Amino acid sequence: MQGSMRWQAVRDEALRRIKTRQWEAGARIPDEADLAAELGCARATVNRALRDLAEAGLLERRRRGGTRVPLNPIRKAVFSIAIIRQDIEARGQTPGYRLLSDCIEPVPPLIAETLGAGTPNEMRHITALHLSNGAPFCLEDRWLNPEIAAPEVRFETLSANEWLVQNRSFSTGSLSFHALNADPQHAAQLGCSPGAALLALDRTTHDTRPITAVRLIYAPGHRIDTNL
Amino acid sequence: MQGSMRWQAVRDEALRRIKTRQWEAGARIPDEADLAAELGCARATVNRALRDLAEAGLLERRRRGGTRVPLNPIRKAVFSIAIIRQDIEARGQTPGYRLLSDCIEPVPPLIAETLGAGTPNEMRHITALHLSNGAPFCLEDRWLNPEIAAPEVRFETLSANEWLVQNRSFSTGSLSFHALNADPQHAAQLGCSPGAALLALDRTTHDTRPITAVRLIYAPGHRIDTNL
DNA sequence: AAGTGGTCTAGACCACAAA
DNA sequence: TTGTGGTCTAGACCACTTG
Protein backbone atom coordinates (compact mmCIF):
# COMPACT_ATOMS: atom_id res chain seq x y z
CA MET A 1 0.00 0.00 0.00
CA GLN A 2 2.81 2.36 0.77
CA GLY A 3 5.54 1.32 -1.63
CA SER A 4 5.04 3.73 -4.48
CA MET A 5 2.25 5.80 -5.98
CA ARG A 6 1.87 7.22 -2.53
CA TRP A 7 1.15 10.70 -3.81
CA GLN A 8 -1.61 9.35 -6.03
CA ALA A 9 -3.20 7.69 -3.02
CA VAL A 10 -3.09 11.02 -1.23
CA ARG A 11 -4.58 12.71 -4.28
CA ASP A 12 -7.38 10.16 -4.47
CA GLU A 13 -8.16 10.57 -0.79
CA ALA A 14 -8.29 14.34 -1.23
CA LEU A 15 -10.52 13.90 -4.28
CA ARG A 16 -12.82 11.68 -2.25
CA ARG A 17 -13.13 14.34 0.43
CA ILE A 18 -13.93 16.94 -2.18
CA LYS A 19 -16.57 14.79 -3.87
CA THR A 20 -18.22 13.76 -0.65
CA ARG A 21 -18.14 17.38 0.53
CA GLN A 22 -16.21 16.33 3.58
CA TRP A 23 -14.25 19.36 2.44
CA GLU A 24 -16.94 21.92 1.72
CA ALA A 25 -16.98 24.08 -1.37
CA GLY A 26 -15.41 27.42 -0.63
CA ALA A 27 -13.85 26.28 2.62
CA ARG A 28 -10.22 25.92 3.56
CA ILE A 29 -8.76 22.48 3.92
CA PRO A 30 -6.07 21.55 6.46
CA ASP A 31 -2.60 22.73 5.62
CA GLU A 32 0.04 20.47 4.15
CA ALA A 33 1.80 19.77 7.43
CA ASP A 34 -1.40 18.64 9.13
CA LEU A 35 -2.40 16.42 6.24
CA ALA A 36 1.05 14.89 6.13
CA ALA A 37 0.82 14.06 9.80
CA GLU A 38 -2.69 12.69 9.46
CA LEU A 39 -1.89 10.55 6.43
CA GLY A 40 1.51 9.50 7.66
CA CYS A 41 3.66 10.79 4.82
CA ALA A 42 6.08 13.60 4.10
CA ARG A 43 4.81 17.08 3.40
CA ALA A 44 6.39 16.95 -0.07
CA THR A 45 4.13 14.04 -0.90
CA VAL A 46 1.03 15.95 0.14
CA ASN A 47 2.32 18.92 -1.83
CA ARG A 48 2.66 16.81 -4.95
CA ALA A 49 -0.89 15.48 -4.59
CA LEU A 50 -2.54 18.83 -3.91
CA ARG A 51 -0.54 20.55 -6.64
CA ASP A 52 -1.83 17.96 -9.07
CA LEU A 53 -5.43 18.67 -8.09
CA ALA A 54 -4.84 22.40 -8.29
CA GLU A 55 -3.51 22.06 -11.84
CA ALA A 56 -6.73 20.30 -12.78
CA GLY A 57 -8.73 23.17 -11.30
CA LEU A 58 -10.13 21.16 -8.40
CA LEU A 59 -8.34 23.13 -5.70
CA GLU A 60 -7.13 26.69 -5.32
CA ARG A 61 -3.87 27.27 -3.51
CA ARG A 62 -2.30 30.45 -2.24
CA ARG A 63 0.70 31.13 -0.09
CA ARG A 64 -0.37 32.15 3.34
CA GLY A 65 -4.00 31.91 2.20
CA GLY A 66 -4.08 28.13 2.35
CA THR A 67 -5.83 25.68 0.06
CA ARG A 68 -9.53 25.92 -0.77
CA VAL A 69 -12.15 23.99 -2.68
CA PRO A 70 -13.30 26.51 -5.30
CA LEU A 71 -16.98 27.46 -5.37
CA ASN A 72 -17.00 27.51 -9.16
CA PRO A 73 -14.29 25.16 -10.34
CA ILE A 74 -12.71 25.98 -13.67
CA ARG A 75 -11.93 22.61 -15.11
CA LYS A 76 -9.12 22.12 -17.58
CA ALA A 77 -9.55 20.05 -20.71
CA VAL A 78 -6.41 18.90 -22.53
CA PHE A 79 -6.34 18.29 -26.26
CA SER A 80 -3.49 16.55 -28.03
CA ILE A 81 -2.30 18.26 -31.18
CA ALA A 82 -0.45 15.84 -33.44
CA ILE A 83 0.62 15.90 -37.05
CA ILE A 84 -2.44 15.48 -39.27
CA ARG A 85 -1.00 12.31 -40.77
CA GLN A 86 -0.57 10.79 -37.33
CA ASP A 87 -4.06 11.88 -36.41
CA ILE A 88 -5.46 9.97 -39.36
CA GLU A 89 -3.31 6.92 -38.70
CA ALA A 90 -4.46 6.91 -35.08
CA ARG A 91 -8.00 6.47 -36.38
CA GLY A 92 -6.87 3.38 -38.22
CA GLN A 93 -7.19 4.95 -41.64
CA THR A 94 -4.80 5.54 -44.51
CA PRO A 95 -3.54 9.09 -44.83
CA GLY A 96 -3.12 10.88 -48.13
CA TYR A 97 -1.86 14.29 -49.12
CA ARG A 98 -2.19 16.61 -52.09
CA LEU A 99 -0.55 20.00 -52.51
CA LEU A 100 -2.96 22.44 -54.09
CA SER A 101 -0.93 25.64 -54.37
CA ASP A 102 2.31 27.17 -53.16
CA CYS A 103 3.32 30.69 -54.09
CA ILE A 104 4.53 33.99 -52.66
CA GLU A 105 1.69 36.45 -52.15
CA PRO A 106 1.01 39.71 -50.33
CA VAL A 107 -0.16 38.96 -46.81
CA PRO A 108 -3.79 39.91 -46.10
CA PRO A 109 -4.07 42.52 -43.33
CA LEU A 110 -6.00 40.18 -41.08
CA ILE A 111 -3.27 37.56 -41.18
CA ALA A 112 -0.56 40.16 -40.69
CA GLU A 113 -2.39 41.47 -37.66
CA THR A 114 -2.69 38.11 -35.95
CA LEU A 115 0.98 37.35 -36.63
CA GLY A 116 2.03 40.67 -35.10
CA ALA A 117 5.11 42.84 -35.56
CA GLY A 118 7.82 41.61 -37.87
CA THR A 119 5.46 40.07 -40.39
CA PRO A 120 6.87 40.32 -43.94
CA ASN A 121 4.76 42.04 -46.56
CA GLU A 122 4.87 38.90 -48.67
CA MET A 123 4.74 35.35 -47.44
CA ARG A 124 4.51 31.88 -48.87
CA HIS A 125 0.87 30.92 -49.23
CA ILE A 126 0.35 27.18 -49.23
CA THR A 127 -2.89 25.27 -49.60
CA ALA A 128 -3.12 21.51 -49.38
CA LEU A 129 -5.62 18.76 -48.89
CA HIS A 130 -5.22 15.91 -46.42
CA LEU A 131 -7.02 12.68 -47.24
CA SER A 132 -8.24 9.84 -45.07
CA ASN A 133 -8.83 6.57 -46.91
CA GLY A 134 -8.91 8.63 -50.08
CA ALA A 135 -11.65 10.96 -48.89
CA PRO A 136 -11.07 14.63 -48.08
CA PHE A 137 -10.22 14.98 -44.41
CA CYS A 138 -8.87 18.45 -43.87
CA LEU A 139 -7.93 21.53 -45.84
CA GLU A 140 -4.70 23.27 -44.87
CA ASP A 141 -4.49 26.98 -45.65
CA ARG A 142 -1.14 28.31 -44.51
CA TRP A 143 0.91 31.50 -44.60
CA LEU A 144 4.55 30.75 -44.01
CA ASN A 145 7.37 33.19 -43.34
CA PRO A 146 9.78 32.65 -46.29
CA GLU A 147 12.72 33.33 -43.98
CA ILE A 148 11.85 30.14 -42.12
CA ALA A 149 11.66 27.69 -44.99
CA ALA A 150 13.97 28.16 -47.95
CA PRO A 151 12.29 28.04 -51.37
CA GLU A 152 14.11 24.75 -51.93
CA VAL A 153 11.92 23.19 -49.27
CA ARG A 154 9.06 21.81 -51.33
CA PHE A 155 5.79 20.54 -49.98
CA GLU A 156 4.72 18.29 -52.85
CA THR A 157 5.00 15.11 -50.79
CA LEU A 158 5.78 16.22 -47.24
CA SER A 159 3.12 18.54 -45.89
CA ALA A 160 4.12 21.88 -44.44
CA ASN A 161 2.32 20.72 -41.33
CA GLU A 162 4.73 17.86 -40.93
CA TRP A 163 7.82 19.79 -41.97
CA LEU A 164 7.17 22.48 -39.43
CA VAL A 165 6.52 20.09 -36.58
CA GLN A 166 9.76 18.31 -37.35
CA ASN A 167 11.83 21.43 -37.91
CA ARG A 168 10.34 24.37 -36.10
CA SER A 169 8.36 22.80 -33.36
CA PHE A 170 8.79 23.88 -29.77
CA SER A 171 7.65 27.39 -30.57
CA THR A 172 4.96 29.38 -28.84
CA GLY A 173 1.71 30.56 -30.32
CA SER A 174 -2.03 30.60 -30.05
CA LEU A 175 -4.76 28.25 -31.14
CA SER A 176 -8.50 28.65 -31.56
CA PHE A 177 -11.54 26.80 -32.87
CA HIS A 178 -14.57 28.20 -34.61
CA ALA A 179 -17.22 27.16 -37.08
CA LEU A 180 -17.63 28.49 -40.61
CA ASN A 181 -19.86 27.90 -43.60
CA ALA A 182 -18.21 26.22 -46.59
CA ASP A 183 -17.73 28.63 -49.46
CA PRO A 184 -17.93 27.20 -53.01
CA GLN A 185 -14.18 26.62 -53.12
CA HIS A 186 -14.13 24.80 -49.78
CA ALA A 187 -17.07 22.74 -50.95
CA ALA A 188 -15.29 21.72 -54.14
CA GLN A 189 -12.08 20.84 -52.34
CA LEU A 190 -13.67 18.98 -49.46
CA GLY A 191 -16.43 17.42 -51.52
CA CYS A 192 -19.27 18.83 -49.46
CA SER A 193 -22.18 21.16 -50.08
CA PRO A 194 -21.64 24.91 -50.14
CA GLY A 195 -22.83 26.31 -46.81
CA ALA A 196 -22.04 23.16 -44.86
CA ALA A 197 -20.88 23.84 -41.31
CA LEU A 198 -17.17 23.17 -40.99
CA LEU A 199 -14.94 23.06 -37.93
CA ALA A 200 -11.88 25.26 -38.32
CA LEU A 201 -8.71 25.42 -36.25
CA ASP A 202 -6.60 28.58 -36.44
CA ARG A 203 -3.07 28.44 -35.22
CA THR A 204 -0.24 30.94 -35.21
CA THR A 205 3.32 30.20 -34.17
CA HIS A 206 6.40 32.32 -33.67
CA ASP A 207 9.68 32.24 -31.82
CA THR A 208 11.61 35.48 -32.17
CA ARG A 209 9.72 36.38 -35.34
CA PRO A 210 6.48 35.18 -36.90
CA ILE A 211 6.72 31.69 -38.34
CA THR A 212 3.33 30.70 -39.66
CA ALA A 213 -0.40 31.20 -39.52
CA VAL A 214 -2.52 28.26 -40.54
CA ARG A 215 -6.19 27.44 -40.74
CA LEU A 216 -7.18 23.79 -40.81
CA ILE A 217 -10.69 23.28 -42.13
CA TYR A 218 -12.07 19.83 -41.44
CA ALA A 219 -14.57 17.91 -43.52
CA PRO A 220 -18.16 17.94 -42.24
CA GLY A 221 -18.82 15.86 -39.14
CA HIS A 222 -15.31 16.12 -37.76
CA ARG A 223 -15.05 16.10 -33.99
CA ILE A 224 -12.31 17.05 -31.61
CA ASP A 225 -12.48 14.96 -28.46
CA THR A 226 -11.04 14.79 -25.01
CA ASN A 227 -11.79 13.44 -21.57
CA LEU A 228 -12.20 15.17 -18.25
CA MET B 1 18.93 34.19 -9.92
CA GLN B 2 19.37 31.03 -7.92
CA GLY B 3 17.09 31.52 -4.94
CA SER B 4 13.94 29.88 -6.18
CA MET B 5 12.48 28.96 -9.53
CA ARG B 6 15.54 26.82 -9.96
CA TRP B 7 13.60 24.05 -11.65
CA GLN B 8 12.17 26.55 -14.12
CA ALA B 9 15.66 27.68 -14.99
CA VAL B 10 16.59 24.07 -15.63
CA ARG B 11 13.46 23.64 -17.74
CA ASP B 12 14.29 26.74 -19.77
CA GLU B 13 17.83 25.56 -20.34
CA ALA B 14 16.54 22.19 -21.52
CA LEU B 15 14.03 23.94 -23.76
CA ARG B 16 16.83 26.03 -25.23
CA ARG B 17 18.83 22.91 -26.05
CA ILE B 18 15.81 21.37 -27.70
CA LYS B 19 15.06 24.45 -29.79
CA THR B 20 18.64 24.94 -30.86
CA ARG B 21 18.91 21.25 -31.66
CA GLN B 22 21.82 20.94 -29.32
CA TRP B 23 19.71 17.97 -28.32
CA GLU B 24 18.77 16.38 -31.63
CA ALA B 25 15.31 15.20 -32.48
CA GLY B 26 14.97 11.50 -31.78
CA ALA B 27 18.16 11.34 -29.73
CA ARG B 28 18.63 10.57 -26.08
CA ILE B 29 19.61 13.35 -23.74
CA PRO B 30 21.89 12.92 -20.71
CA ASP B 31 20.31 11.21 -17.74
CA GLU B 32 19.08 13.10 -14.72
CA ALA B 33 22.14 12.46 -12.59
CA ASP B 34 24.50 13.83 -15.24
CA LEU B 35 22.38 16.89 -15.84
CA ALA B 36 22.14 17.54 -12.12
CA ALA B 37 25.91 17.39 -11.83
CA GLU B 38 26.41 19.60 -14.87
CA LEU B 39 23.88 22.21 -13.78
CA GLY B 40 24.83 22.06 -10.13
CA CYS B 41 21.54 21.11 -8.60
CA ALA B 42 19.81 18.10 -7.08
CA ARG B 43 18.49 15.33 -9.27
CA ALA B 44 14.97 15.98 -7.98
CA THR B 45 15.16 19.46 -9.45
CA VAL B 46 16.15 18.12 -12.87
CA ASN B 47 13.37 15.56 -12.55
CA ARG B 48 10.82 18.28 -11.91
CA ALA B 49 11.98 20.26 -14.94
CA LEU B 50 12.06 17.36 -17.36
CA ARG B 51 8.75 16.01 -16.11
CA ASP B 52 7.22 19.38 -16.84
CA LEU B 53 8.50 19.30 -20.42
CA ALA B 54 7.33 15.72 -20.86
CA GLU B 55 3.81 16.68 -19.75
CA ALA B 56 3.79 19.33 -22.45
CA GLY B 57 4.82 16.74 -25.01
CA LEU B 58 8.28 18.16 -25.63
CA LEU B 59 10.15 15.18 -24.22
CA GLU B 60 9.51 11.45 -23.97
CA ARG B 61 10.65 9.68 -20.84
CA ARG B 62 10.91 5.98 -20.08
CA ARG B 63 12.36 4.07 -17.22
CA ARG B 64 15.59 2.48 -18.21
CA GLY B 65 15.09 3.87 -21.74
CA GLY B 66 16.10 7.38 -20.81
CA THR B 67 14.74 10.68 -22.05
CA ARG B 68 14.40 11.55 -25.74
CA VAL B 69 13.38 14.48 -27.90
CA PRO B 70 10.43 13.10 -29.86
CA LEU B 71 10.62 13.12 -33.66
CA ASN B 72 6.97 14.07 -33.98
CA PRO B 73 6.03 15.94 -30.85
CA ILE B 74 2.40 15.73 -29.80
CA ARG B 75 1.72 19.07 -28.24
CA LYS B 76 -0.91 19.51 -25.59
CA ALA B 77 -3.35 22.41 -25.66
CA VAL B 78 -5.25 23.21 -22.47
CA PHE B 79 -8.70 24.78 -22.51
CA SER B 80 -10.39 26.19 -19.44
CA ILE B 81 -13.99 25.16 -18.97
CA ALA B 82 -15.81 27.57 -16.70
CA ILE B 83 -19.45 28.24 -15.94
CA ILE B 84 -21.01 30.04 -18.90
CA ARG B 85 -21.86 33.03 -16.75
CA GLN B 86 -18.26 33.36 -15.64
CA ASP B 87 -17.14 32.97 -19.23
CA ILE B 88 -19.29 35.94 -20.24
CA GLU B 89 -18.20 38.02 -17.28
CA ALA B 90 -14.57 37.32 -18.09
CA ARG B 91 -15.19 38.99 -21.44
CA GLY B 92 -16.34 42.10 -19.62
CA GLN B 93 -19.95 41.65 -20.63
CA THR B 94 -23.19 41.32 -18.73
CA PRO B 95 -24.58 37.79 -18.54
CA GLY B 96 -28.26 36.96 -18.87
CA TYR B 97 -30.22 33.75 -18.72
CA ARG B 98 -33.61 32.51 -19.88
CA LEU B 99 -35.09 29.07 -19.31
CA LEU B 100 -36.86 27.86 -22.43
CA SER B 101 -38.21 24.47 -21.40
CA ASP B 102 -37.92 21.88 -18.65
CA CYS B 103 -39.83 18.63 -18.74
CA ILE B 104 -39.47 14.88 -18.43
CA GLU B 105 -39.16 13.17 -21.80
CA PRO B 106 -38.15 9.81 -23.23
CA VAL B 107 -34.40 9.81 -23.89
CA PRO B 108 -33.44 9.64 -27.58
CA PRO B 109 -31.41 6.53 -28.38
CA LEU B 110 -28.36 8.56 -29.41
CA ILE B 111 -28.22 10.33 -26.06
CA ALA B 112 -28.79 7.09 -24.16
CA GLU B 113 -25.94 5.49 -26.07
CA THR B 114 -23.44 8.20 -25.28
CA LEU B 115 -24.43 8.15 -21.60
CA GLY B 116 -23.95 4.40 -21.44
CA ALA B 117 -25.37 1.77 -19.13
CA GLY B 118 -27.69 2.84 -16.35
CA THR B 119 -29.37 5.58 -18.37
CA PRO B 120 -33.02 5.97 -17.35
CA ASN B 121 -35.66 5.66 -20.03
CA GLU B 122 -36.91 9.12 -19.20
CA MET B 123 -34.84 12.11 -18.23
CA ARG B 124 -35.31 15.76 -17.56
CA HIS B 125 -34.89 17.69 -20.81
CA ILE B 126 -33.88 21.29 -20.24
CA THR B 127 -33.27 23.96 -22.84
CA ALA B 128 -32.11 27.44 -21.98
CA LEU B 129 -30.57 30.49 -23.56
CA HIS B 130 -27.56 32.32 -22.20
CA LEU B 131 -27.27 36.00 -23.07
CA SER B 132 -24.31 38.34 -23.26
CA ASN B 133 -25.16 42.03 -23.04
CA GLY B 134 -28.70 41.05 -23.91
CA ALA B 135 -27.76 39.24 -27.11
CA PRO B 136 -27.97 35.47 -27.55
CA PHE B 137 -24.67 33.89 -26.56
CA CYS B 138 -25.22 30.19 -26.22
CA LEU B 139 -28.00 27.65 -26.33
CA GLU B 140 -27.98 24.95 -23.65
CA ASP B 141 -29.69 21.67 -24.56
CA ARG B 142 -29.42 19.30 -21.64
CA TRP B 143 -30.60 15.84 -20.60
CA LEU B 144 -30.38 15.45 -16.85
CA ASN B 145 -30.75 12.30 -14.79
CA PRO B 146 -33.79 12.99 -12.57
CA GLU B 147 -32.18 11.00 -9.78
CA ILE B 148 -29.49 13.65 -9.57
CA ALA B 149 -31.57 16.78 -9.25
CA ALA B 150 -34.87 16.60 -7.37
CA PRO B 151 -37.87 18.08 -9.21
CA GLU B 152 -37.87 20.82 -6.59
CA VAL B 153 -34.61 22.08 -8.04
CA ARG B 154 -35.81 24.66 -10.53
CA PHE B 155 -33.73 26.28 -13.21
CA GLU B 156 -35.75 29.44 -13.81
CA THR B 157 -33.05 31.75 -12.50
CA LEU B 158 -30.04 29.54 -11.81
CA SER B 159 -28.93 27.65 -14.92
CA ALA B 160 -28.53 23.91 -14.80
CA ASN B 161 -24.99 24.55 -15.97
CA GLU B 162 -24.23 26.50 -12.82
CA TRP B 163 -26.18 24.22 -10.49
CA LEU B 164 -24.31 21.17 -11.69
CA VAL B 165 -20.91 22.76 -11.43
CA GLN B 166 -21.66 23.81 -7.89
CA ASN B 167 -23.28 20.56 -6.82
CA ARG B 168 -22.06 17.71 -8.95
CA SER B 169 -18.74 18.90 -10.18
CA PHE B 170 -15.63 16.83 -9.82
CA SER B 171 -17.09 14.09 -11.96
CA THR B 172 -15.55 12.43 -14.97
CA GLY B 173 -16.79 12.52 -18.53
CA SER B 174 -16.01 13.35 -22.12
CA LEU B 175 -16.05 16.51 -24.14
CA SER B 176 -16.02 17.19 -27.86
CA PHE B 177 -16.36 20.03 -30.34
CA HIS B 178 -17.94 20.00 -33.74
CA ALA B 179 -19.68 22.32 -36.16
CA LEU B 180 -23.32 22.18 -37.21
CA ASN B 181 -25.72 24.13 -39.38
CA ALA B 182 -28.38 26.10 -37.55
CA ASP B 183 -31.82 24.58 -37.98
CA PRO B 184 -34.82 26.94 -38.02
CA GLN B 185 -35.32 26.57 -34.28
CA HIS B 186 -31.68 27.29 -33.48
CA ALA B 187 -31.86 30.27 -35.79
CA ALA B 188 -34.91 31.67 -34.03
CA GLN B 189 -33.46 31.14 -30.58
CA LEU B 190 -29.99 32.47 -31.37
CA GLY B 191 -31.16 35.21 -33.71
CA CYS B 192 -29.14 34.04 -36.67
CA SER B 193 -29.89 32.79 -40.18
CA PRO B 194 -30.96 29.19 -40.72
CA GLY B 195 -27.97 27.26 -42.00
CA ALA B 196 -25.42 29.44 -40.22
CA ALA B 197 -22.36 27.52 -39.04
CA LEU B 198 -22.41 27.11 -35.28
CA LEU B 199 -19.79 25.78 -32.90
CA ALA B 200 -21.17 23.08 -30.61
CA LEU B 201 -19.67 21.54 -27.48
CA ASP B 202 -20.96 18.14 -26.37
CA ARG B 203 -20.29 17.05 -22.85
CA THR B 204 -21.29 14.02 -20.84
CA THR B 205 -20.62 13.53 -17.15
CA HIS B 206 -21.14 10.65 -14.77
CA ASP B 207 -19.81 9.34 -11.49
CA THR B 208 -21.24 5.96 -10.58
CA ARG B 209 -24.21 6.47 -12.89
CA PRO B 210 -24.93 8.87 -15.74
CA ILE B 211 -25.47 12.46 -14.62
CA THR B 212 -26.01 14.59 -17.68
CA ALA B 213 -25.45 15.03 -21.40
CA VAL B 214 -25.40 18.57 -22.66
CA ARG B 215 -24.86 20.32 -25.96
CA LEU B 216 -23.86 23.95 -25.88
CA ILE B 217 -24.48 25.69 -29.20
CA TYR B 218 -22.75 29.04 -29.48
CA ALA B 219 -23.90 32.03 -31.48
CA PRO B 220 -22.15 32.54 -34.84
CA GLY B 221 -18.59 33.79 -34.66
CA HIS B 222 -17.84 32.26 -31.28
CA ARG B 223 -14.25 31.14 -30.75
CA ILE B 224 -12.61 28.91 -28.23
CA ASP B 225 -9.04 29.99 -27.58
CA THR B 226 -5.91 28.80 -25.90
CA ASN B 227 -2.17 29.28 -25.99
CA LEU B 228 0.63 26.84 -26.62
C1' DA C 1 4.67 39.79 11.75
C1' DA C 2 3.51 35.33 10.90
C1' DG C 3 1.45 31.39 8.58
C1' DT C 4 1.16 28.81 4.41
C1' DG C 5 2.55 26.99 0.10
C1' DG C 6 6.81 26.71 -3.17
C1' DT C 7 11.02 24.86 -3.76
C1' DC C 8 15.65 22.77 -2.99
C1' DT C 9 18.70 19.13 -1.20
C1' DA C 10 20.93 14.65 -0.31
C1' DG C 11 20.07 10.21 0.10
C1' DA C 12 17.43 6.17 -0.50
C1' DC C 13 14.59 2.51 -2.50
C1' DC C 14 11.63 0.88 -6.09
C1' DA C 15 9.56 -0.14 -10.85
C1' DC C 16 10.19 -0.84 -15.27
C1' DA C 17 12.18 -1.92 -19.64
C1' DA C 18 16.20 -2.47 -22.44
C1' DA C 19 20.42 -4.96 -23.18
C1' DT D 1 20.84 -8.22 -15.23
C1' DT D 2 21.26 -3.40 -14.89
C1' DG D 3 20.57 1.40 -15.92
C1' DT D 4 17.19 4.93 -15.85
C1' DG D 5 13.30 7.46 -14.36
C1' DG D 6 9.58 7.60 -10.42
C1' DT D 7 8.90 8.47 -5.94
C1' DC D 8 9.51 9.12 -0.85
C1' DT D 9 11.65 11.34 3.16
C1' DA D 10 13.23 14.78 6.59
C1' DG D 11 14.80 19.01 6.95
C1' DA D 12 15.59 23.53 5.46
C1' DC D 13 14.94 28.15 3.53
C1' DC D 14 12.28 31.28 0.85
C1' DA D 15 8.21 33.98 -1.19
C1' DC D 16 3.97 35.58 -0.91
C1' DT D 17 0.01 37.54 1.30
C1' DT D 18 -3.01 38.07 4.73
C1' DG D 19 -4.24 39.92 9.17
Image (tube, coloured by chain):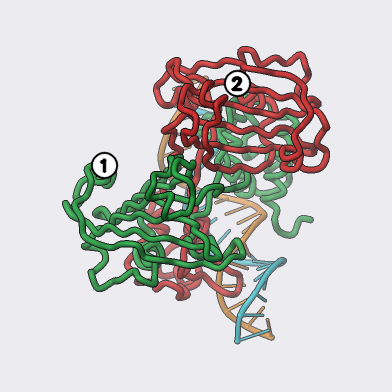
Chain colours: A red, B green, C orange, D cyan
Up/down of B130 relative to A81, above or below: below
Same chain under badges 1 and 2? The reply is no
Alpha carbon distance from label 1 to label 2: 35 Å
Question: In the figure, is residue A8 to the left or right of B220?
Answer: left
Q: In the rendering, at what x and y percent does residue A132 appear?
A: 45, 20
Residue A160: quadrant of the picture: top right
In percent of the image, x 59 and y 26: which residue is there?
A140
Please tell me how crowded label 2 is: few (under 14), some (14-19), or many (20+) other residues with Cα within 10 Å. Answer: many
Q: Are marks 1 and 2 in contact (CB under 8 Å)?
A: no
Q: Label 1's element?
A: helix
Task: Please give the residue where the numbered disc 1 appears in the rendered image.
Answer: B110
Whether residue A14 is visible to the viewer of this picture, yes or no, is no
Question: In the figure, is residue A99 to the left or right of B132?
Answer: right
Q: Chain of mark 1?
A: B
Q: Which is nearer the eye, B71 or A11?
A: B71
Q: Which is nearer the eye, A215 or B172?
A: A215
The furthest residue to the left = B121
Up/down of A36 relative to A144, above or below: below
Task: Count the marks.
Answer: 2
Task: Please give the residue where the numbered disc 2 appears in the rendered image.
Answer: A128
In percent of the image, x 21 and y 60: which residue is there?
B104
Question: In the figure, is residue A223 to the left or right of A100?
Answer: left
Type of residue at label 2?
Answer: Ala
In percent of the image, x 58 and y 41: which residue is there?
B56
Residue A90: quadrant of the picture: top left
Instruction: In the rendered structure, find residue A36 and report the number of the disc placed on it.
Output: none
Q: Label 2's element?
A: strand
Q: Chain of mark 2?
A: A
Whether residue B159 is visible to the viewer of this picture, yes or no, is yes
Q: In the rendering, at what x and y percent does residue A99 appear?
A: 61, 16
Type of residue at label 1?
Answer: Leu
Q: In the rendering, at what x and y percent does residue B121 appear?
A: 16, 51
